Image: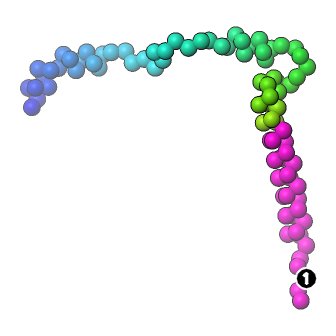
Amino acid sequence: MWRNLLVRGPSLRQVSQRTISTASRRLLENRVPEKQKLFQEDNGLPVYLKGGIMDGLLYRVTMGLTVFGTGYVLYELMMASMPKKQK
């Protein structure tokens, strides 16, 4: 058993000495310069809205959920602070 491993050893050594690369084999277009231009442009918009329509929608949904959640927590605190009347 060990003799088979020793005989096949050089091929195992070659495999173990290969460089492991995490780079993608596909060539992807580098869009970083485009995004840098977009986000560095001085157009009066805050950076969290410069991504387009989806950023605006995400911002509005987040703000709506925050306001709703705050109101709900205040309502529940008010209900918890008032004792229920016993009949």
Q: For the N terminus, which image quadrant?
A: top left
Identify the residue at image location x=88%, y=55%: 71
- Please provide percent x and percent y for residue 87: 89, 89
Identify the residue at image location x=72%, y=12%: 34
Identify the colour scheme used: rainbow
Check disc 1 and report its element: helix, strand or loop: loop
- Please provide percent x and percent y for residue 42: 87, 14
Rendered image quadrant of residue 40: top right
Segment colored magenta: 60-87
Identify the residue at image location x=80%, y=35%: 57
Query: Residue 79 lies in magenta, yes or no?
Result: yes
Q: How many marks?
A: 1
One can see residue 48 in this view = no
Say which amino acid is labelled 1. Lys
Q: Main secondary structure of the magenta part?
A: helix
- Please provide percent x and percent y for residue 39: 78, 17
